[in-house]
Amino acid sequence: MRGRSTIRVLVVDDSAFFRRVITRALTADPALEVVGEAGDGRAAVEMAARLAPDVITMDVDMPVLDGIAAVQAIMAARPRPILMISALTHAGAEATLAALDAGACDFLAKQAGTDATALQRFTTALVTRVKSVAARPARALTARRVAPALDRAPRTYPGLQCVVIGASTGGPPVIGDILGALPVGFPLPVVIAQHMPGAFTGCFAERLDRRSAIRVQLAADGDALAAGTAYVCPGGLQTTIERNGAGLPRLRVEAGSPIARFRPSIDVTFAAAARVFGARVLAIVLTGIGDDGCHGGRELKQVGAPMWAQDEASSVVFGMPRAVIEAGLADFVLPSTAIAPRLLEAV
């Protein structure tokens, strides 16, 4: 039995094979300890209450009680970080996004089959994600506050032409809250670079569109940027912005460099927005692992564009917002619930 300083994990999956894969990967890391395994959602709810794990890995499609219902029950009783393990299918995407809305922190796509290389990629990512979500409290437990020391930006931005949003771990529910608060007739286009597999981004855009007064669509190459429309950058591709022959802004969606850290890359989208709009674009960096958005943020600040960052208390993972704040790029540091009201004020 490991020391209490380890991260205690409950593994939930109806597949005995994947329970073994996940358990072996986690127990191989000295910082992690698997304290229990469950094969269905009802057992997961009971074991979560009894074992009080630091993190739960949760399958989506399970018997007795599915992953979404299990997340809802756990978050209602005693919230804790939950990492969803989902299939790379449309149904898997729908269920995973519903689980994120219910309070799960993050998700990881399950590798199909038993290919050794694919399983190694999956288990490496699994360990990283478990550690990252364990570092923050569950979304339902986060405080809501503003950091006034960094509240140094004007409240309106005359001539603003576009909003660009970058997000990773924990981003989908926050993006849903922001877009859901924008009214019909919102006067700007919104471009969203969310780290997410390509199999998920179309479903994500459809889900946002159903829940928003403004139009939300998956970005396509050549799309003209229209006011009152949000464009979700497709996973696995790079989305930039350029001006067409008439000087109007449009999207370019292409493969991009195969060695890029992320596709979509927030840095790439931010840098393109800086070149096209100059100071007339507002960039918002939300919760996420790493520092994607910081390099592109520097290009935005060089042309005088404003930048906001989500605060630590409301972030599932404070990596990306922290990077732009520590680099001196953030004009506002805001809790997630304050972003939409301040955005409406700004435009």
Image (tube, rainbow, N blue to C red):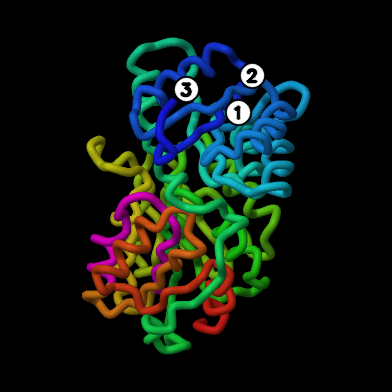
The residue drawn where x is 41% and y is 37% is 6
Residue range in magenta is: 282-300
Mark 3 is surrounded, within 10 Å at the Cα level, by few (under 14), some (14 to 19) or many (20 or more) other residues, namely: many
Q: Position of residue 97 (x, y in %)?
A: 61, 43
In the picture of the structure, the residue carrying the numbered disc 3 is 22
Please determine whether, in this image, residue 268 is positioned above or below residue 255.
Answer: below
Q: Position of residue 131 (x, y in %)?
A: 40, 41
The residue drawn where x is 44% and y is 10% is 114
- Asked which quadrant contains residue 82, the reply is top right
In the picture of the structure, the residue carrying the numbered disc 2 is 14
Amino acid of disc 2: Asp
Q: Magenta span has 331?
A: no
Circles 1 and 2, Cβ within 8 Å, touching? The answer is yes
Quadrant placement of the N terminus: top left
Amino acid of disc 3: Ile
Element assignment for label 3: helix
Q: Position of residue 293 (x, y in %)?
A: 32, 59
Alpha-carbon span between mark 2 and mark 3: 12 Å
Nearer to me, 249 or 80: 80
Observer-side mark, 1 or 3, equals 3
Q: Position of residue 174 (x, y in %)?
A: 56, 59
Nearer to me, 206 or 22: 22
The answer to which of marks 2 and 3 sits earlier in the sequence is 2
Nearer to me, 222 or 68: 68
In the picture of the structure, the residue carrying the numbered disc 1 is 59
Residue 129 visible (yes or no): no
- Asked which quadrant contains residue 184, the reply is bottom right
Alpha-carbon span between mark 1 and mark 2: 7 Å
